[in-house]
Amino acid sequence: MPDPKYICQRCTNCCRWPGFVRLTNEDITRIAAYLRQSEFRFIQTYTRLRPHRDGLALQDQADGSCVFLDGKGCTIHSVKPAQCTGFPNEWRFPDWRSVCKAIAVEAEDRGRALEPKDAQRPVAVSESPPHDP
Ligand code: SF4
Ligand code: SF4
């Protein structure tokens, strides 16, 4: 049986996990344009250096949630970083299923939800930490 696909339920739990939302150059260009500001201003306003200074990540709010979470959802949903759009189908972290509410469906039939025991079977796990999401 092929791996299921996971359909996000927009619970926003992945926007509240501790960690780093990594930004690619393409993410920065796309989000800055959406916000109608220069890339320089976007970087100055919304980003921070990742550990080891190996790139940029989004800033957190005081409670640890992502700077673009407004309480109900992502304010840049249509242009959000690739790391956000890739979770949980393209990358995962250990124990991700304990907080993610995404519904598993058959890869060939996205309209049919799997039984919970099938949805929670072991899958390949990324080493990336959360918000990493
Ligand atoms: S950019 Fe949006 S989807 Fe990504 S962590 Fe922040 S609020 Fe969540
Ligand atoms: S935790 Fe899972 S279901 Fe919730 S918003 Fe993130 S990807 Fe979607």
Image (cartoon, helix red, strand yellow):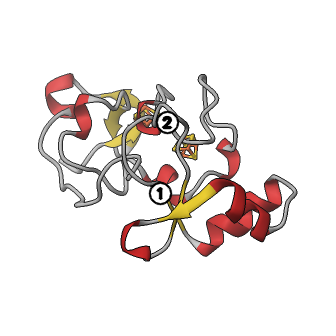
Asked if residue 101 is positioned above or below residue 7 in the image, the reply reads: above
Q: x and y percent of residue 103 in the render?
A: 36, 29
Front residue of 31 and 100: 31
Mark 2 CB lies closer than 8 A to ligand 1 = yes
Q: Secondary structure at mark 1?
A: helix
Q: Quadrant of ligand 2?
A: top left
Residue drawn at (60%, 34%), measured in percent from left and top?
69
Front residue of 37 and 75: 37
Q: Which residue is mark 2?
A: 65
Q: Return the disc, 2 or 1, that comes first in the chain's sequence.
A: 2
Residue drawn at (34%, 35%), measured in percent from left and top?
105
Q: Residue furthest front?
A: 62
Q: Residues within 10 Å of mark 1 (few under 14, many from 20)?
A: some
Q: x and y percent of residue 122 in the render?
A: 12, 44
Residue drawn at (47%, 57%), measured in percent from left and top?
83
| Numbered badge on residue 83 | 1
Q: Is residue 33 left or right of residue 67?
A: right
The kind of residue tagged 2 is Ser
Q: Is residue 104 left or right of residue 35?
A: left
Q: Secondary structure at mark 2?
A: loop
Alpha carbons under labels 2 and 1: distance apart: 15 Å
Front residue of 69 and 49: 49
Q: x and y percent of residue 82 in the render?
A: 53, 59
Residue drawn at (49%, 36%), measured in percent from left and top?
65
Q: Is residue 97 left or right of residue 113?
A: left
Mark 2 vs mark 1: give the one in front.
2
Mark 1 CB lies closer than 8 A to ligand 1 = yes
Quadrant of the rendered image containing residue 67:
top right
Asked if residue 41 is positioned above or below residue 4 in the image, the reply reads: below
